Image (cartoon, helix red, strand yellow):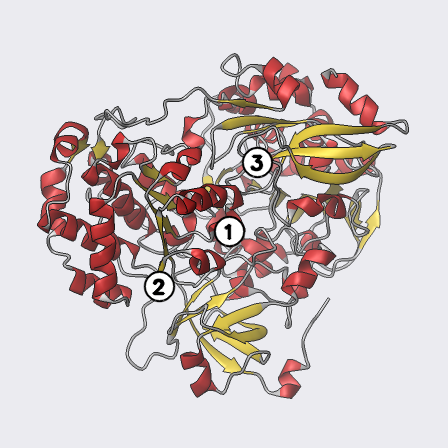
Amino acid sequence: MSATETFAASGTGADTVQVRGACPHDCPDTCALLTTVAGGVAVRVQGNPDHPQTGGVLCTKVSRYTERSYHPERVLQPLKRVGRKGEGKFEPVSWDAALADIAARLSAIAARDPQAIVPYSYAGTMGLVQAEGMAARFFNRLGASLLDRTICSAAGTEALVHTLGGKVGMRVQFFAESKLILIWGSNSIASNLHFWRYVQQAKRDGARIVCIDPRKTETADKCHEHIALRPGTDAALALALMHELIVHDWLDHDYIARHTLGWDALRELALQWPPERAAAICGVPVEQIVRLASDWGTTQPAAIRLNYGMQRVRGGGNAARAIACLPALTGAWRHRAGGLLLSSSGQYPIDRAALQRPDLLAGRQPRTINMVTIGDDLLREPDEGFGPRIEALVVYNSNPVAVAPESVKVVRGFAREDLFTVVLEHFQTDTADYADYILPATTQLEHWDIHASYGHTDVLLNRPAIAPQGQALPNAQIFRELARHMGFDEPCFADDDLTLCRAAFGETVSFDELLDKGFATLQLPDAPFASGSFPTPSGRCEFFSARLAAQGLDGLPDHLPNHELAEPGSAWPLAMISPPARNFLNSSFVNVDSLRAIEREPLVEIHPDDAAPRGIRSGDAVRVFNPRGSYHCKADVSARARPGVVNGLGVWWRKLGLNGTNVNELTSQRLTDMGRGPVFYDCRVEVARLAPAEAACGNPA
């Protein structure tokens, strides 16, 4: 079946066909999909059994994708605000009227200073076309402010760049052959399901599996050991492991000499971190640290699956750097089943210049706005350092009112009556409630796209399986139409989505193979760093980074305490982390009835030792609060929380919360040590039981 025939067959007629696609969501698995279409209606979404990484298996969320695509509350026509900002009142309007008004408003602002216009987007779709393809062309041509897209992985990314040379690492399938696997800062069963299949295979073959996480996750339940360290202490643990590797001589001296840089300095630092020191900081038994070091130092092949939860604290970059040093110390990289994987996305030969056309800036150098600090930035007045006041926001593939930190300020910023806001969306989210226009976007079943992955090394092509619902348009088409209404006549704005798909990898990946199979595997070595050749300036694993030192940062990885620490007698005695609820993905899927029915209601997990003195029992309505705000939810008294730490499961839409807030009412806009990332898990709070009268004054939707 040809590229054009697929959509024609699935969009019309009574025949039943299966259409190959790819999951668009922010997950390392990037699954290959098969959508069954009968008479133009998608009736089932399943994993493609021919794709080795997917193996015919999908998570609970995406297996219900048809429920999302055909949701009765989906936005299917352009809407114009008629009520107050945040009130959520809109009226239908034609596409032409909406686009003409938006273009006129943006043109008027751009005539004063295009930097007053800010795009705000992230990973609502991971597709290279519907994310930052035509959208980037539009904003580059406009000369709008640039967006620093840091809200998820920036600290860990920067750490890998300055240690391994980029977002590179093991090939995920070889974890199945490992004899020791450290799952560090990841609830793999919930957020990396297909990696967990390889863990299970390794476990059946005798591998030891250790989970390192403040929360006793579903993954921790299934591991041989759980090390429940305090949030933000991962670097201390890694340095103590190095200490033990040194004093017991569990080192690969040849690998260190040939393929690393800065060993003498790292050795001196690590010797200052005996297990007793780290145990006091991490809040774990000394014996656990000693045993873990012995396991790592004496087992081959050994591997680390690192994830991004542990880098969402002040010292997150340093922590990721310290952990990324461990495989080189023991020569774990010599084996294809040894080493580390945080992200594989740096291994893809994506031609971003062809997709995004930075040449359209024509020499202009717009300012950059950090998406983490959007609350502060929307409230800032113009000044010499900041530039013009933000006058317009175009939001796509994101829900910042729900997901950005310190949402009290985010809401105040979005509520500005003088702020012109356009939101491309599937649903009337918390952010869409503050829009001047909501523009209906297609879902993954309705458009072309092409995908890389950050958990494996296959390229996937997504074909449209059904016709766009209602008046919905692909993101790329919306930006084409905006460009036309603003008079942008460069030929690149006429490129269709299939042309963009072909441009993403140029000749480096066979597009015919993608059309035929739906996926293509990158040709990469099994053990990429067995003989060094790291993509760093030195070609070595850089324990010491001269590039970081040149920025005025420590060239060695070290433990940095959290921004917010418990002081004796503190009014905010509890640390709070906010890991995702198992059946949501960031704020996606929160409005899918079947998934919300599983999660039931917003929860904070609290350990019995912390609940008892506060008179809190499971099911009680509680107030979680700090100087930034107050969040009402239900308590789950559970050993999933460690003493002194509460787990605010997220990310619920604010309007579905008990008092119209969510957990980001409490998080701060402070940044990480490197990468300018968020510190969602570096947060102090108190928890109090709500009186029945207070609990009854909620705001359920």
Q: Nearer the viewer, mark 1 or mark 2?
A: 1
Q: Amino acid at mark 1?
A: Ile
Give the residue drawn at x 78%, y 24%.
7
Quarter of the rendering occupied by the C terminus? bottom right
Question: Dot 1: few (<14), some (14–19), or many (≥20) neighbours within 10 Å?
Answer: some
- Viewed as shown, does residue 308 lie left or right of 563? right
Q: Disc number at residue 54?
A: 3
Residue type indicated by callout 3: Thr
State how far apart marks 2 and 3 are (Cα). 30 Å
Q: Are marks 1 and 2 in contact (CB under 8 Å)?
A: no
User: Are discs 2 and 3 less than 8 Å apart at CB?
Assistant: no
Residue 514 position, x and y percent, is: 61, 20
Residue 228 is situated, as x and y percent measured from the top left of the image, at 35, 63
In the rendered image, residue 677, in percent from the top left (x then y), is placed at: 41, 48
The residue wearing badge 2 is 228
Looking at the image, how many numbered discs can be counted on the residues? 3
Task: From the viewer's perspective, tell me whether residue 270 is left or right of residue 13.
Answer: left
> Which residue is under mark 1?
189
Q: Residue at x 64, y 58 (%)?
A: 415
Image quarter of residue 179: top left
Q: Is residue 170 above or below residue 487?
A: below
Q: Please tell me whether mark 2 or mark 3 is closer to you in this view.
A: 3
- Of the numbered discs 2 and 3, the one sitting upstream in the chain is 3
